Image (tube, coloured by chain):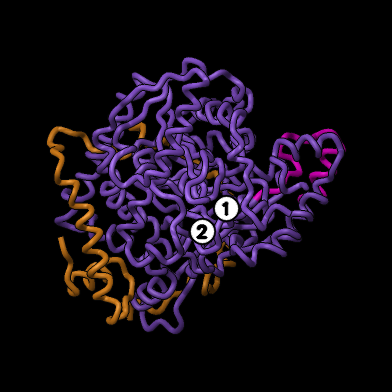
Amino acid sequence: MSLDAEQVKKIAHLARIEINEADIPGYAATLSNILDLVDQMAAVNTDDVEPMAHPMDASQRLRADVVTETNQREQFQSVAPKTEDGLYLVPQVIE
Amino acid sequence: MYHNKTLAELSAMLQAGEVTSVELTQHFLDRIKSKDGDINSFITVTEEQALAQAKAADERIAAGNGVALTGLPFAQKDIFCTQGVRSSCGSKMLDNFNSPYDATVVSKLKQAGAVMLGKTNMDEFAMGSSNETSFYGAVKNPWDLKKVPGGSSGGSAAAVAARLAPAATGTDTGGSIRQPASLCNLTGLKPTYGRVSRYGMIAFASSLDQAGPMARTAEDCALLMNAMAGFDEKDSTSIDKEVPDYSAGLNQSVKGLKIGLPKEFFGEGLDPKVAECVDVAIRQYQDMGAEIIDISLPNSGLSVPVYYVVAPAECSSNLSRMDGVRFGHRCDEPKDLEDLYKRSRGEGFGEEVKRRILIGTYALSAGYYDAYYIKAQKLRRLISDDFKQAFEQVDVIMGPTSPNVAFNMGEKSDDPVSMYLSDIYTIAVNLAGLPGMSIPAGFADEMPVGLQLIGNYFEESRLLNVAHAYQQQTDWHQRCPSGFED
């Protein structure tokens, strides 16, 4: 399986990562090598095998829907790049 | 000197009043100052906090309330969130991130009174096997400064090997405790998935990640496990199962122990000199009364390809939280929200992290999900079932931890696939969720070789016991790299 420059750009867009144009061929080459490695999976028939999501097939624990945390907004926002009046600031989204 | 003693020995000295925690802590801080320039094993040294914790520990011991770890210095992998202290995960993305809370592992070690010397270097977001992907520069192997210490817990491994700390925490997603332990002559334990809380441990691949101890001896790993293990409500995959006293089982006999040797771990690709060390170690177990049984893990050869779908898929999802909005790196003057996401992530992540996010994004994208992610999960079950069958016949599985000794810096950094293959014997254990260890088992070309021990679910005690028995008869684990003895 090999990826071309256009596919790499599309995946980078889906992942919301900017990649310099000059670096695209390098990514295309290494990602293609990784996919060649991954393609070895096709060698084994898995038609009747149940996919395994958890090592012990455990499911997520549920808890009662009650408040367990105290409000620490100020502390959490102290590490944010930009806040105002308790809100996270980003560039304007809606005109 | 203090730095040549184990945690257990230092603990006894503290309890007997032969040394204070402040003296010990100062000793290790001084060593870090004078020697870490050579190996770059720490990202942050928390001198002031460490001395304050040491002082509190001395008071606690004097009041008679100390436990085994009280007052003992250790190094914390920088993947664990530590309140008020930079928690970078080896990434530019989190270079400015002073965590607002403690990981559960961090608070448990604090409660025990252990003294954190600082945060250790690591591959960025734990993605690497050589510690060359860190934003803070590569870590060097104390056994040969031209060679890598392994990864991703390479800073923890190098720090303990160089006697800059008596022990350290690590995390292991595909071998990140065991492989650096092997390459630096340490004892490292990756517990059963769910045994140690993942809360506050910056997530890489959530169905594989597990924290564990790295030290010089199995006895010291047991001491750390006693504090680290246990159920945590804050981790939804934590397992609610009683924690045994890991120190209590150390001295059981290994007579009659059934050791399985998977033929797949001794084939092509294994350095013959590494194979020889492993063979000698296994013969030693035989001399101690263990029984050797040949087994097969027929699907284990697919564990690297399976891992490089599952782990990137999970990381692409986990690392989506690094978006420049609530914490971490934000680009200058974003022109719109998409630009903010793309440039913050493009600037904040290093090349290997980007590569894995891209692979994961691709594997999860429409039209490819079944062919990659579901296929990998099916193979994961086959790999796991192989182990289940093996453990019907044997008590532990043994083999090499890594196919080679430490490689040269730069040797594999341009070739991701060859780097990935250095975890060929460790990855299957994470896919199955089993506990695994690496222990020092000799030297090839003057570099350390690790023996891997794999146990059945929740059999950390047995692994520690089997490792301890070997360490009572050998002195590989006591060897110190030259230049770091004094």
Q: Residue B156's mark?
A: 1
Q: What subunit carries mark 2?
A: B
**Residue B294 visible to the viewer:** yes
The colour assigned to chain A within the rendered structure: orange
Helix, strand or loop at mark 1: helix
Closer to the camera, B362 or B158? B158
Residues behind callouts 2 and 1 on a single chain? yes
Q: Quadrant of residue B66?
A: top right
Q: Is residue B273 magenta?
A: no
Magenta-span inclusion, residue B59: yes
Q: Residue at x 86, y 40 (%)?
A: B18
Residue in view at x 37 percent, y 69 percent = B351
Write down the chain letter for disc 1. Answer: B
Q: Are marks 2 and 1 in contact (CB under 8 Å)?
A: yes
- Chain B colour is purple
Highlighted range, magenta? B53-74
Residue B93 image offset from top left, x and y in percent: 47, 68
Q: Quadrant of residue B400?
A: top left
